[in-house]
Image: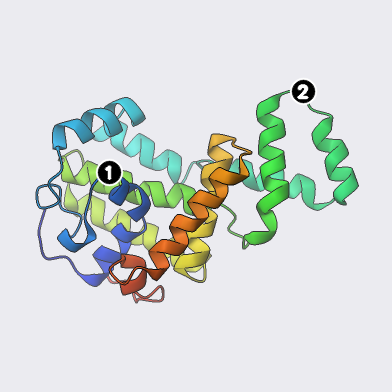
Amino acid sequence: MNNTLSESQLWALAAGDVLLSGNGYDFACAYDTERSGIDAAKVNQEVLLNGWSISDHLSAWKSLRFLTVEGGHHEEFDRCRFALSVMNAQQQNQYISSFHDEMIIAELTIVQHYHGLLPAAGVLAWDLGRAAFIGHLCMEFGLIDPDEAWPFLIHNASLLQQSYASWEEFGTAYIIGRQFWAKSLDPDQTEKHLESIIGRMQDPNSPWAILPWELKLEA
């Protein structure tokens, strides 16, 4: 990958920083695979092949379309949110308890607990944050040409800026989206992940502290 990235390109990749840094990619190295000391074969196998069934150009775009235009997980969150929005707390509890499927109960309970922390965009951050991560990996490993990948990544970043007011709001929505995806009702896990978002905001070397949320994105 070109070692010289624009601020707009860095911002677009920083949207995927939770997973990029979690897999060893260093913002100081422009998230470059070689410069970050990444075992490319391992990431390709464990993340793209095993995690996402991505092996070529077609499967790469299939996953990216799922996360974006096909609604990912945020559309289901929005459906649950809308259903609960017309009920008071007692009605919500009765509605949730009427289900026998534990997965549905978990989804509705998570929405009930956390929807007040979110703007209208809900957990779109979870899908678009992962799209930034997957889009970058696919570009790094030659599955998507940079001439295709960068317009997608910049557009993805622009949608995030339009949907959230700050990195903190984006990060909160991302973590709640992760809980919804995992169907996890463990408050300790939620707190742990939210603390990681706060840590990113306080770390002076974090891209979320360095790159302003309102950065004008240029193709």
Q: Residues within 10 Å of mark 2 (few under 14, many from 20)?
A: few
Marks 2, 1: nearer the viewer: 1
Question: Where residue 14 sits in the image (x, y, percent)?
Answer: 32, 60
Instruction: In this rendered view, identify the residue nearer to me: 10 or 171.
Output: 171
- State whether residue 12 is above or below residue 165: above
Name the image quarter holding the C terminus: bottom left
The tally of labels here is 2
Question: Residue 23 has which mark?
Answer: 1
The x, y position of residue 173, in whole percent, is 54, 56
Residue drawn at 31 percent across, 54 percent down: 152
Which of the two residues, 191 or 214, is positioned nearer the viewer here?
A: 191
Q: Amino acid at mark 1?
A: Asn
Residue at (18%, 60%) from the top-left corner?
A: 30
Going 23% across and 47% down the picture, which residue do you hit? 24
Q: Which mark is residue 100?
A: 2
Q: Are marks 2 and 1 in contact (CB under 8 Å)?
A: no
* Amino acid type shown at disc 2: His
Judged left or right of residue 139, residue 19 is right
Residue 141 visible in the snapshot = yes
Tell me which residue sits at (83%, 44%) in the image: 92
